[in-house]
Amino acid sequence: MTTKITIHGAAGRMGRSIAAVLAEDQNAELVAGVDRGEAVGKDLGLLAGKGPTGVLVVADLEEAFRKADVVIDFSLPAATRGVMEAAGSVGVPVVCGTTGVDAEGRASIDALGKAQPVVFAPNYSQGVTALFHLAARAAELLGEGFDAEIVEMHHKLKVDSPSGTAMRLAEVVAGAKGFSLEDDAVYGREGDVGARPKREIAVLALRGGDVVGEHTLYLQGMGERIELTHRATDRGIFARGAVRAAHWVKGKAPGVYDMFDVMGVAR
Ligand code: NAD
């Protein structure tokens, strides 16, 4: 059955990428888009780099949310509370990909989760979600005889380091090994650092060129090592994951879910 979707943040990079994914999806229909300023009145199809659809960007959240089975929100933290409250008054589930959401925004997500199903994930890539799962299982299986180290690589314009995804990967591996990032993570080595302690996870960042994003977990034993790598070549991975989440969330029980739930990954 078709999933009717409204995009909040429709004119942004992610909003346009999601509209492009929806245009190819036989089981989804883009019914409305919300944005602000000059974007209002623009055709969603043209914004997505496709042909005109006649569906225009509007500024009124409730009007746009009422048409949808699911709202996908990739906008700004300042908008989160308004999105959740409008979804609550209309009674529609939300897939939220906005990052940097503050405590007030998080509280509004939890409040909506009491009445509607909400998916809230910092990374909608299906491959990255699988990497987190495989990393935790491998670290558990191999135990303390294997040293874990993480290397990530991104384009030269990225301003934060290490990436949020590398930190989440480190958290997952630390959890599986019984380590804590606060006490056991290091972010570089230089000079007379001594032999590697047993309780240590290094998270190292490389920068350059136009690399979309690469993350490798090394599990290094004596005489063997495993390398688990995720390579992103296209930012559309987040849009495809968000659309998968939108299909999944329709008809689910109220609650706040993440990509592990969407992909049926055991924790
Ligand atoms: P962007 O700046 O290109 O787009 C954001 C859009 O939201 C803009 O068009 C803006 O006008 C609109 N917007 C902001 N506040 C609004 C409001 N109050 N009402 C209506 N429209 C509003 O940004 P982007 O690259 O598309 O990223 C959007 C968000 O998604 C960011 O928080 C980003 O970090 C996040 N993101 C998450 C993932 C993930 O997997 N979870 C992946 C990529 C990006």
Image: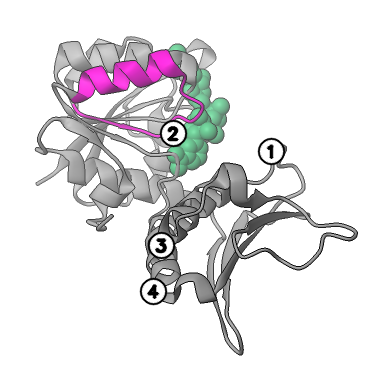
Tell me how far mark 3 sits from mark 4, CA to CA. 9 Å
Where is residue 222, by image quadrant?
A: bottom right
Residue 165 percent coordinates (x, y) = 53, 48
Could you tell me which secondary element the residue under label 1 belongs to?
loop
Mark nearer the N terminus (4 vs 2):
2
Say the numbered circle drawn on residue 15. Answer: 2
What amino acid does circle 2 point to?
Answer: Gly
Please identify, in this view, whether the residue under mark 3 or under mark 2 is nearer the observer: 3
Where is residue 64, by image quadrant?
A: top left
From which residue to which does the magenta span run? 93-113
What amino acid does circle 1 point to?
Answer: Asp
What amino acid does circle 4 point to?
Answer: Leu
Residue 226 percent coordinates (x, y) = 53, 78
Farthest right residue in view: 191
Tell me how far mark 3 sits from mark 2, CA to CA. 32 Å
Q: Is mark 2 within 8 Å of ligand 1?
A: yes
Say the numbered circle drawn on residue 5. Answer: none
Tell me how far mark 4 sits from mark 2, CA to CA. 40 Å
Is 235 located above or below residue 132 in the figure? above
Q: Residue at x 38, y 39 (%)?
A: 121
User: Badge 1 is on which residue?
Assistant: 160
Say the numbered circle drawn on residue 136. Answer: 3
Residue 23 percent coordinates (x, y) = 33, 45
Q: Nearer the viewer, residue 27 or 164?
A: 164
Q: Residue at x 45, y 68 (%)?
A: 139
Q: Is residue 57 visible?
A: no
Tell me how far mark 4 sits from mark 1, CA to CA. 32 Å
What amino acid does circle 3 point to?
Answer: Ala
Whether the residues at callouts 4 and 1 have beta carbons within 8 Å, the answer is no
Mark nearer the N terminus (4 vs 1):
4
